[in-house]
Amino acid sequence: MSLGDIIMAVPIKMPRAARMELVTLGENIRVARLRRKLTAEIVAQRAGTTRQTIAKIESGNPAVKIGTYVAVLQALGLLKGWGDIDDPVGEQMALDDLPQRARLKNG
């Protein structure tokens, strides 16, 4: 057993909500692949990975590297806009930190 096998065997702890999002993402990737009538093998070749890794992605396995998810999305033509994260809470926090008014210095 290699170090990589040992690392992969260790369960990854993550919040349930995050885990469910990965499962949903995996299901959506599978649906997109099937709608395009592509086999897991073809997507794996295009993404530079293996059929087994595609199966892990489609099951929402959290041990798969994010770069591999991105490569698979690219292979399916779904990468555009994927990294856009709308953060209204963060934007509001930044606005709240702005000074309420500017003062002119007399001098």
Image: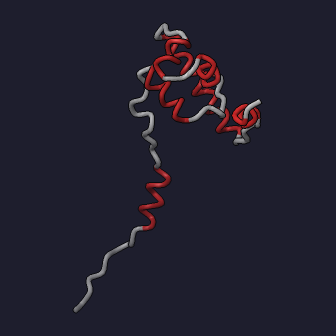
Percent x, y of residue 80: 39, 30
- Residue 107, placed above or below residue 41: below
The quarter holding residue 21 reads top right
Q: Residue furthest bottom?
A: 107
1 vs 49, left or right, is: right
Please name the residue shown 56% across and 17% down the image: 30
The quadrant of the rendering that contains the C terminus is: bottom left
- Residue 103, placed above or below residue 92: below
User: Relative to the observer, which residue lies in front, 14 or 69?
Assistant: 69
Percent x, y of residue 103: 30, 81
The quarter holding residue 66 reads top right
Percent x, y of residue 65: 58, 34
Q: Residue furthest front?
A: 2
Please name the residue shown 34% across and 74% down the image: 101
76 vs 65, left or right, is: left
Q: Residue furthest top?
A: 37
Please name the residue shown 47% across and 48% down the image: 87
The quarter holding residue 99 reads bottom left
14 vs 97, left or right, is: right
- Residue 16, placed above or below residue 88: above
The quadrant of the rendering that contains the N terminus is: top right
